[in-house]
Image (cartoon, helix red, strand yellow):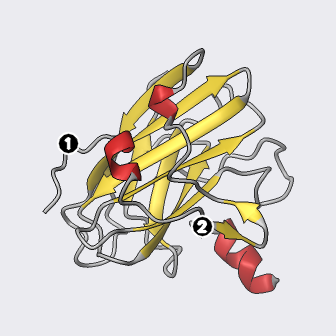
C-alpha cells in the first residue's frame, strides 16, 4: 500500500505529431487503475469532444527535469468541465516506446516550480484519486501516448496545469501544459 501511495503522490517536491486524441485512442493503452482507482481510459470520450462542456487547452512545454532521451516530447492536454464533472485528456508524442507514464493536475502554472504541488479538490486531503486527478498510460511502439480520465467533481479554475513524468521516476517531470482559462 505504501508503494501505491508513493506512486500516486508522484511529482515529488512514425506517427504524425498532429494525431488527435480520437485518432490516438485506437492505439493507446487499455484502461489503467492502481489500487482500484481509475487513472485513465483511452476509450473514453476525449475532453475536447465533450458536448455541453467548457473546454480549455494547453500545449506541453519541455521541463529541465526531464530524463535523457526525451527532448522530442510534445503534445496537448485538454480539461473539460461539464455537469458531469471534470474530464482531462493528454496526448503526447516523442515518448520512449512501451514505457509507462503518469500525469497529474497541478495548482500552479508551469512557470511556478514546474507546476508546483498537485491540485486537490480538498486541500490537505488525500493525495490519491478521487481527491486528485491522475492519468496513467503506456506509450505505443512509436512513442505516442494518450488517455482520458473523468472525475465527478469540477476543478473550477484552480487546476491550472498538467505535468507528465515517467511512472518510475516521479521527480523527473518531462513536460508541463498550462490551461488557458
Label 2 sits on residue: 13
State which quarter of the image contains the N terminus: bottom right
Task: Report, in whole angstroms, how far the alpha carbon at label 2 lies from the one at label 1.
Answer: 33 Å
Crowding at dot 1, Cα within 10 Å, few <14 / some 14-19 / many 20+, comes out as: few
In the image, 64 versus 142, the foreground residue is 142
In the image, 173 versus 32, the foreground residue is 32
Crowding at dot 2, Cα within 10 Å, few <14 / some 14-19 / many 20+, comes out as: few
Q: Give the answer, above or below, for where 175 lies relative to 95.
A: above
- Is the Cβ of the residue at disc 2 closer than 8 Å to that at disc 1? no
Q: Can residue 113 be seen in this view?
A: no
Q: Earlier in the sequence, mark 2 or mark 1?
A: 2
Q: Which residue is drawn at 79% across and 50% down?
A: 131
Q: Give the answer, above or below, for where 81 lies relative to 42.
A: above
Q: Residue at x 52, y 49 (%)?
A: 43
Q: Is residue 32 visible?
A: yes
What kind of element bears circle 2?
loop
x and y, in percent, of residue 127 in the image? 77, 60
x and y, in percent, of residue 142 in the image? 22, 68
Label 1 sits on residue: 18
The residue positioned farthest toward the top in the image shown: 52
Q: Residue at x 54, y 25 (%)?
A: 50
Q: Which of marks 2 and 1 is in front?
A: 1
x and y, in percent, of residue 79 in the image? 53, 33
Q: Residue at x 66, y 43 (%)?
A: 150
Q: Residue 72 carries which label?
A: none
x and y, in percent, of residue 70 in the image? 25, 70
> Quarter-wise, where is residue 52 in the image?
top right
150 lies left or right of 74: right
**Number of numbered discs overlaid on the protein picture:** 2
39 lies left or right of 79: right
In the image, 73 versus 27, the foreground residue is 27
What kind of element bears circle 1?
loop
Amino acid at each position: 500500500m505504501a508503494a501505491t501511495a508513493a506512486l500516486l503522490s508522484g511529482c515529488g517536491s512514425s506517427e504524425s505529431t498532429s494525431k488527435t486524441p480520437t485518432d490516438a485512442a485506437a492505439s493507446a493503452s487499455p484502461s489503467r487503475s492502481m489500487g482500484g482507482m481509475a487513472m485513465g481510459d483511452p476509450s473514453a470520450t476525449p475532453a475536447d469532444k465533450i458536448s455541453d462542456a467548457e473546454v480549455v487547452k494547453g500545449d506541453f512545454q519541455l521541463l529541465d527535469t526531464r530524463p535523457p532521451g526525451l527532448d522530442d516530447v510534445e503534445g496537448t492536454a485538454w480539461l473539460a468541465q461539464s455537469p458531469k464533472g471534470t474530464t482531462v485528456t493528454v496526448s503526447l508524442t516523442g515518448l520512449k516506446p512501451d514505457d509507462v507514464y503518469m500525469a497529474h493536475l497541478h495548482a500552479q502554472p508551469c512557470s511556478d516550480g514546474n507546476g508546483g504541488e498537485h491540485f486537490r479538490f480538498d486541500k490537505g486531503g488525500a493525495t490519491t484519486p478521487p481527491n486528485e486527478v491522475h492519468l496513467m498510460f503506456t506509450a505505443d511502439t512509436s512513442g505516442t501516448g494518450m488517455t482520458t480520465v473523468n472525475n465527478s467533481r469540477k476543478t473550477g479554475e484552480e487546476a491550472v496545469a498538467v505535468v507528465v513524468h515517467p511512472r518510475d521516476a516521479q521527480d523527473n517531470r518531462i513536460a508541463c501544459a498550462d490551461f488557458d482559462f
